[in-house]
Image (cartoon, rainbow, N blue to C red):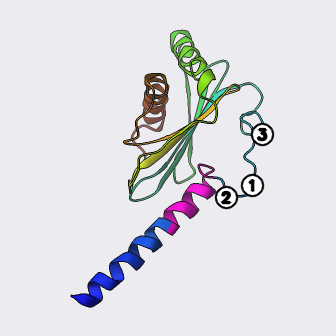
Amino acid sequence: MTRRRALRPAATAIVALIAAVLMVSAGVLTPAGTAQASPTGGHLRPGSLVRYVKTGGFAYTHQVLSIDKLGRVTATATDGSQHHAQLTPAEVTSVRRAVGRLAGYDGRRYMAPGSADTFVYQVTTAIARVTYEDGATRPAVVGEAGDLLNSILARTLGGIR
């Protein structure tokens, strides 16, 4: 029993370290002493409306959704496969409205303390970059934009994980 208890803190530290490394590589966290690029500093391609990244989870997911100003959608699955779709004009208006409301939240991060195996989401627009995690308390406008983008991502990937 004593040996198992002694290993638990070490295992917890290793899991935390791996999670931190994955979050740094995904661009969710920035190592101390480095500057994080602005949302328009090469993270959003010209002509893009929004970029949405979903990372994490128990089996580690890395999915990327890009929507351009004309409503063309590119979704990249964890395995690297790309899927394309076209939003209707009404959907483009909904996305523009939702991401436009993020203007006052640039650089904000909403993380859930003590969480594990959760997804981390990052929404990047020309005016804001917002990061949040499952279970984190966040403003309604952040949740609404994220929910809309997540539904487009899931629909475009067609159930591919």
Residue 13 among magenta residues: no
When the figure is inspected, residue 149 is found, relative to residue 95, above or below; the finding is below
Identity of the amino acid at label 3? Answer: Gly
Q: Position of residue 140 (x, y in %)?
A: 43, 23
- For residue 46, which numbered disc appears in the image? none
Characterize the local packing of mark 3: few (<14), some (14-19) or many (20 or more) Cα atoms within 10 angstroms: few
Q: In this view, does 64 lie to the left or right of 156?
A: right
Left or right relative to 136: residue 51: right
> Residue at position x 61%, y 20% from top?
71
Secondary structure, mark 1, is loop
The circle drawn on residue 34 is: 1
- Residue appearing at x 72%, y 46% in the figure: 36
Mark found first going from the N terminus, 3 or 2: 2
Give yes or no for contact between labels 2 and 1 (Cβ–Cβ under 8 Å).
yes
Quick check: marks 3 and 2 in contact, CB under 8 Å?
no
Q: Which mark is in front, 1 or 3?
A: 1
> Dots 1 and 3: beta carbons under 8 Å?
no
Residue 18 falls inside the magenta stretch: yes
Q: Residue 42 carries which label?
A: 3
Separation of disc 3 and disc 2 at Cα? 19 Å
Secondary structure, magenta segment, majority class: helix
Q: Identify which residue, 122 or 60, lies in the foreground.
A: 122
**Corner quadrant of residue 74:** top right
User: Residue 132: percent from the left, percent from the top?
Assistant: 49, 40
Q: What residue type is labelled 1?
A: Thr
Badge 1: residue crowd in 10 Å (few <14, some 14–19, many ≥20): few
Which element carries disc 2, helix, strand or loop?
loop
* Highlighted magenta segment, given as a residue range: 17-29
Per the image, the residue denoted by label 2 is: 31
- The picture places residue 102, in percent across and down from the top left corner, at 58, 23
Q: Where's residue 43, x and y in %?
A: 72, 39
Q: Nearer the viewer, mark 3 or mark 2?
A: 2
